Amino acid sequence: MNSLEASRILSVLDESLEELSLLSFVTTEVLETSEQLRDVLGEDMVNNILKHRTTLQQHGKSNLGAEPVMASTWELVRLMKKSPSTQRLQRLHTDRSEGMLQVLSYMTKLRHYAQKRLTTTVEEDNSNREYYEEVKEREERAVSEKIQLEQKLKLQRVELQKQSNQVQNAEDKTRAELHELQNNTQAHQEAIERGAAGVRHEDFMTFDTELQVLQRELDSEKARLVTLREENKLAEANYRKTKKRAQQDVESVIGEYDQDLGSKESEFQEEFAEYQAVLQKLETFTAGYTEMYRERLDYEDEQKRIAEDTLQKGLHRVRTNRAARVIQAAWRAMKARRAAELKKKKKAEAAKKKKK
């Protein structure tokens, strides 16, 4: 089947779905109250609805496949597709029948299924079939794994139940031991409390006896303390006298020390003044020595410069004399060479004259 035929089939299904949708709004309530809806739906629409109602009444609901009923239905649908009153009919708050809604739902599903089948190629169909087989196989494996896991879960539950029973038995045993231990502990505690009561009574008796002994010792120590206080008062008076004499001696020693320190201070000031004078002289001598040393250095530098100049002048004079001697020797040699050349030239001229 090519795409054109598929589009035609889909177009027919769409048109059928549209017509069924329009026809679903023509409910029993609309048929019965169509005369009151003339102002809303218009004259043509109401007349066709009345005609359709009459046809239905004549043939009955059990004979909906009769030719007149089909023609009336087709005429009504054709008018609803063209008439603008159809929108007003759709806006009426009427409950469409359950059967028509089921038919519309079935036609919608049929249209989607047909579109899917018509627009699916052979390759896509094979791919979908393979995918379905794969999903089916996965589901079977999943079911098998689920059964195995359920069996394992049952075994684990049994094992856990056994462990729970063991734990419960151990807990019951532990509780019994704990109850017995609590009873033993309570009995032991009562025995300890009875023994502690006897020991407490004995301790109280011993404490009273020791308290009386300590009270007598405390009284004797208090009397001894009074005696010691009297003795300490006398000793403190003697100590104060001794301290006063010692303070007087210290003050006299401090006075002598101050006098001695004053004389030492005057001597120190005199010695310090002499020291400052010596420092001043030393600074003066140091400044003079520095000046003399600087002059000595300047004199030595001047002598060095004079000696250097004298040496340079002597060297220049020696070089000048040497150059003069060299020039003089060169001049004598040149004069001798010229004289020899002149003499040779004269001899040559004389020889030429003789030949002539």
Image (cartoon, helix red, strand yellow):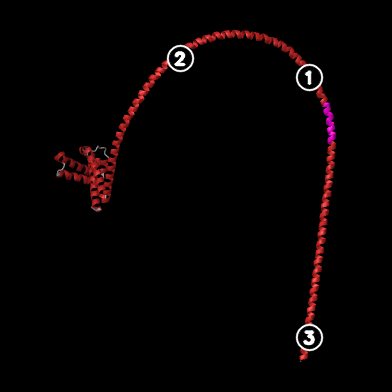
Badge 3: residue crowd in 10 Å (few <14, some 14–19, many ≥20): few
Residue at mark 3 to residue at mark 2: CA–CA distance: 171 Å
Above/below status of 293 relative to 325:
above
Circle number at residue 246: 1
Q: Nearer the viewer, residue 220 or 250?
A: 220
Query: Where does the image place residue 294, in percent across and percent down from the top left?
Result: 82, 50
- Are circles 2 and 1 on residues that touch, CB within 8 Å? no
207 is within the stretch colored magenta: no
Of marks 1 and 3, which one's residue comes earlier in the chain? 1
Badge 1: residue crowd in 10 Å (few <14, some 14–19, many ≥20): few
On the rendered image, what quadrant is the C terminus found in? bottom right
Query: Where does the image place residue 283, in percent across and percent down from the top left?
Result: 83, 43
Q: Which residue is mark 3?
A: 347
Above/below status of 336 relative to 279:
below
Residue at mark 1 to residue at mark 3: CA–CA distance: 145 Å
Above/below status of 203 relative to 339:
above
Which corner quadrant of the image does residue 334 belong to?
A: bottom right
Tell me what residue is drawn at x 17 percent, y 44 percent: 70
Query: Where does the image place residue 177, in percent across and percent down from the top left?
Result: 39, 19
Q: Secondary structure at mark 2?
A: helix
- The stretch in magenta equals 258-272
The answer to whether 180 appears left or right of 97 in the picture is right
Q: Which residue is mark 2?
A: 189
Amino acid found under the numbered disc labelled 3 = Lys
